[in-house]
Amino acid sequence: MTTELQSQAEQLGTVVMGGTFDPIHHGHLRSAVDILDYFQFKSLRLIPCYQPVHKGEPTVSAEQRLHMVQLGITGDPRLTVDAREILRAGPSYSIDTLIELREELGPNEPLIMVVGMDSFLSLPTWGRWQELLDVAHILVISRPGWEPDLISTLAAFYEKHRAESPAELQCAPSGKIWMESFTPLAISSSQVRNLCRKQASIAYLVPETIQRFIEAHSLYK
Ligand code: ATP
């Protein structure tokens, strides 16, 4: 992960990672920290959705998922949480969130949406997906078990918009896609929920504070 990016001063740019976070786990958190270190961004915002558009209803309330994200980010002051989708309620369309952020940031600030490879592969099923690059860049991070086998529509979209280097995400406000591999952690929220259901340990998959919160509130039983 040694690139010219690491030798530059702290970079401008707003980085967001959306998700259901049902619950947040070390796969999310380590990826976020890897991104911050690699790009030298000041901060990364985690945006828990209210109602996911591409998955079933979350198992626990939006407030509990938000609380677990807040517990999860305490280990790194560069991580922040943005509750806008929960406050907005209704189906959480990423395009709505990115347009809102773009209005707040103004036209020039780079805005980077982080998605795992599994989410990227499903992009053509997202609402108004082709408009995402009008307002943001997309940073695709690898995820164990998911290969970049893009269906033709997505492959064409990727070829048209792929950046030549990661630095391009910081040189323009929007419009580029970059794929990057970081610490491979085969952890998923479904795995955590399944383990809880079986009354097995979730230690080392989620931060201890979250493990305690899940146990104290008997979540995912
Ligand atoms: P579930 O198992 O319930 O489907 P999940 O583990 O995929 O949940 P989400 O909250 O849906 O978690 O994921 C939010 C974002 O983080 C998505 O873009 C997803 O691809 C990415 N992500 C989740 N887990 C990892 C991981 N272990 N490594 C890299 N990216 C991840």
Image (cartoon, rainbow, N blue to C red):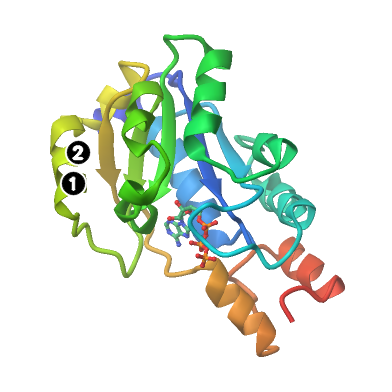
Residue 1 visible to an observer of this rendering: no
Towards the viewer: 68 or 107: 107
Q: Position of residue 193 (x, y in %)?
A: 63, 75
- Between residue 61 and residue 35, name the one nearer to us: 61
Secondary structure of residue under mark 2: helix
Name the residue rendered at 18%, 59% in the picture.
Answer: 149
Label 2: few (<14), some or many (≥20) within 10 Å? some
Q: Under tag 1, what secondary structure? A: helix
Between 150 and 163, which is closer to the camera in this rendering?
Answer: 150
Nearer the camera: disc 2 or disc 1: 1
Q: Quadrant of residue 145?
A: bottom left
The correct choice, above or below, for 160 with respect to 68 in the image is above
Q: Report if the CB atoms under discs 2 and 1 are less than 8 Å apart.
A: yes
Direction from residue 90 to residue 54 in the image, left or right? left
CA separation, marks 2 and 1? 6 Å
Report x, y in % for residue 69. 68, 51
Q: Is residue 190 left or right of residue 219?
A: left
> Which of the 4 quarters of the picture holds residue 197?
bottom right
> Residue at the location (70% across, 36% down)?
88
**Mark 1 sits on what residue?**
153
Left or right of residue 172: residue 210 = right
Q: Give the x, y percent position of residue 212.
A: 79, 69
Looking at the image, can residue 192 be seen? yes
Q: What's the residue type where badge 2 is placed?
A: Phe
| Amino acid, disc 1 | Thr
> Where in the figure is residue 64, as x and y percent of width and height?
78, 57
Q: How many marks?
A: 2
Residue indicated by mark 2: 157
- Residue drawn at (55%, 31%) of the image: 97
Q: Nearer the viewer, residue 178 or 59?
A: 59
